[in-house]
Amino acid sequence: MANVKFVNEDAEINVADGSNLRFKALENRIDIYTFSGKLMNCGGYGQCGTCVVDVVAGGENLSPRTQVEERKLKKWPASCRLACQTTVNGPVSIVTKPDRKQKAASSAAKES
């Protein structure tokens, strides 16, 4: 069993190893979508790119990024994942609905 902590929601859930992050978040009433994502998400097939989450701890306990994620998340920091493409294999901390502009600015500041 793996523990998934959702930072913004101050919530933790336990999931079986190999569980899909999007499915388990929604099953436990954790809202991973912004307003536009709620209106036009693809249902978990990796086509829309609206289920972006930021992994703040435990990234090594997630499945590797898929080719779909590499395409959809080109402009996002490396710590961001598509929840629908991510399986959980150990403890992890997640920030839902990250702000791409804010994250990109903080990443650029760290690099300088």
Image: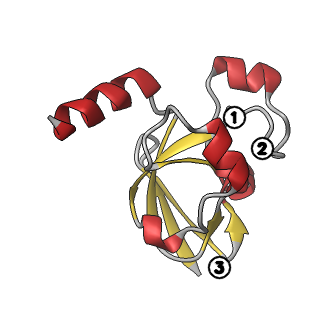
Q: Secondary structure at mark 2?
A: loop
Q: Secondary structure at mark 3?
A: loop
Quarter the N terminus occupies? bottom right
6 relative to 90, above or below: above
Given residues 53 and 78, the one toward you in this image is: 78
Left or right of 34, for residue 79 = left
26 relative to 101, above or below: below
Bin the neighbour count of mark 2 within 10 Å (Cα to Cα): few under 14, some 14-19, many 20 and up. some
Quarter the C terminus occupies? top left
Q: Which residue is mark 2?
A: 46
Amino acid carrying mark 3 in the image: Asp
Q: Determine the residue positioned at 68% across, 32% down.
A: 50
Bin the neighbour count of mark 1 within 10 Å (Cα to Cα): few under 14, some 14-19, many 20 and up. many
Q: Determine the residue positioned at 65% across, 37% down.
A: 72
2 relative to 39, above or below: below
Q: Which disc, if any, is residue 23? A: none
Label 2 vs 3, first from the N-terminus: 3
Does residue 4 appear anywhere in the picture? yes
Left or right of 36, for residue 91 = left
- Whether tag 1 and tag 2 are in contact, CB under 8 A, the answer is yes
Q: Determine the residue positioned at 62% across, 47% down.
A: 70
Left or right of 41, for residue 69 = left
Q: Which residue is mark 1?
A: 49
Q: Which residue is mark 3?
A: 17
Amino acid carrying mark 2 in the image: Gly
Mark 3 or 1: the one toward you: 1
